[in-house]
Image: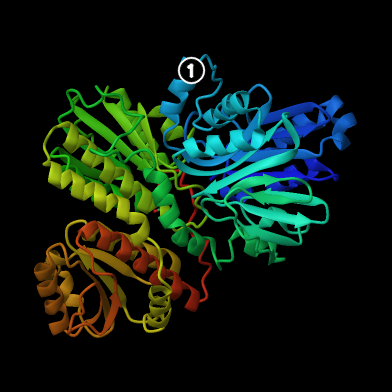
Amino acid sequence: MCGIVGYIGQKDTKKFLIDGLKELEYRGYDSAGIALLGCDSIEVFKAVGKLVNLEDKLNNNSTLNIQNSTFSTGIGHTRWATHGKPTEINAHPHLGNYSFVVHNGIIENYKELKTSLQANGVEFLSQTDTEVIVHLFEKHFEQTNDSAQAFKNTIKELHGAYAILLITKSEQNKIFFAKSGSPMIIGKNSDEMFFASSDAPLIGYANEVIYLEDGDFGEVTQDNISFYNEKKQIWNKLQTSKQLAQKNGFRFFMEKEIYEQSDVASDCMLGRIKDNGTNFDEIENSFFDNIFDIKICACGTSYHAGMVGSYLIERLGKMRCSIEIASEFRYKEPLLLKNTLFVVISQSGETADTLEALKMAKNAGLKTLAVCNVDNSSITRLADVTLLTRAGIEKGVASTKAFSTQTLVLWMLALYIGTKNKALSDTLIQNELHTLRAIPKALKIESIMHEKCKRLSKRYLHGHGFFFIGRDVFYPLALEGALKLKEISYLHAEGYPAGEMKHGPIALADPELFTIALMPQNLLYDKIKSNVEELSARDSTICSISALPFELADDFIQINTTNHYMLEFFEMLVALQLLSQEISIRLGNDVDMPRNLAKSVTVE
Ligand code: M6R
């Protein structure tokens, strides 16, 4: 996820920007840049890769070193690529003729805006959505000769998510800002104003802060803020712990990432949900010509997301779809046929087995598609098409937000294929789109749910194992729930299709065997109910996760009543993640870095 900083005042602008960007490194990035404004001159520096590359450029610039004190205004950015590769040209700040902009988020209508600006002779340098902002601003400035009005007109035209800072030679002692959907904080000290995407860069610099809300926009000078939306200024004391600030106040990165799922789900869907179906700018119209079936390959959590995808692609896409674990696929001498689309899923884009499977498919001449979180990773560089999940950096070894965004991308892909093949009724398409739009809300965590998981966790610290059971897409969800628990609690847990229990595993049932039963109201409820009854009859301890109370359950985690099984799916996902985390905490384990595991598995 991108990071933003900004400064206006009489101290060392460059130092605050670089120190601030360093504090935001934990958000993940693949390029960085700053722009400095003062005494009629504007300077911009950008570099691909780590911040040290940017620092080298700054240190080697002799003019800057002489003039440093004259730059009283500056903006900086770390970029996590979403539109366009991580190159210097695509790095922020983006420039017009006399203005610079940094942006976090996604401008959904950038294509329309870009086309109209190009028609009026504007030339674009980058492939990013962000660049439209600075050209729009300059267009409006030329029409009004009023920077504030030009900024207001610009913001009015943008759809999507953004935190924006803009500086311009036409108004040298101001920074213009806007926030909708992406985080942004203003900090102040005497005669200085600061901006940052989170608290961490401001600690040690600002005394008080305003946490901007969606719809806030305006301008700052070094000692004043004007909100164009007439917001009341409420200043808060700034916390002092940088470590806590990086985790946004959460105890663990995993917890922060569980809570981030609602926001990253919105980012993941931005621009991809249209009125009549789903759309991926990355996929050309002819991409699915002559494709008769899909093979998905992945490892671990990504494999579980792939399993959910395989159900949805057959159900909604009406296309045959199979899935394999990459490490198995590699050595089975698989039959690879040209009419198969080969899909790989990977958070890191570096998993050795998945990468090798992709190479095999490429060598066999198959079309390939990657669902991945890290642009410019080995997998995205190799695949014909990449659909980025836009989850931002995932630090916790136990994958959480990567799974939810992978599942969303595959669901949107299934709908895309089904719509393209005219296999779905308008009513069904509209119902799916409506449900997709509701997912960010389903992923918002109610404190009562977290409290319940905390309380229940103390009852599940012993025993001889856990069965997580579910049917249909709730079967891969059960697998994912079991994987989360074993990774961070070191307790034995297995995921099972509920209907399979009586074919053997039920022999293990006794009061010390815990069953976590995923019981969706909107999908095969009666079937799973009888499976759970069978386990209860053998005295297994049952914890049901459902909207409906179940009289035989010993414990119950209640989710909201909804009308679509995928809404239940995402609510249950959160419950499973929180329950695992709370059990792990009670056992005194390292939640973010569990024993024996690595975040990225680059060996087979
Ligand atoms: O980066 P990838 O998605 O390719 O990683 C695959 C697995 O190694 C990963 O999902 C692993 O299972 C996680 N630790 C699960 O939480």
Residue 86: give x, y in percent of width and height: 54, 31
Give left or right: position of 319 versus 512: left
Q: Amino acid at mark 1?
A: Gln
| Image quarter of residue 386 | top left
Q: Nearer the viewer, residue 470 or 452?
A: 452
Question: Residue lying furthest front in this view?
Answer: 144
| Image quarter of residue 178 | top right
Going 45% across and 66% down the picture, which residue do you hit? Answer: 488
Q: Secondary structure at mark 1?
A: helix
Q: Is residue 595 visible?
A: no
Above or below for 93 versus 602: above
Q: Name the residue beneath numbered marker 1.
A: 118
Residue 593: give x, y in percent of width and height: 53, 61
Give left or right: position of 208 versus 68: left
Quadrant containing the C terminus in the rendered view:
top left
Give left or right: position of 302 versus 166: left
Q: Which color scheme does this rendered protein use?
A: rainbow
| Image quarter of residue 326 | top left
Question: Residue lying furthest right in this view?
Answer: 66
Going 35% across and 49% down the picture, which residue do you hit? Answer: 302
Above or below for 68 versus 585: above
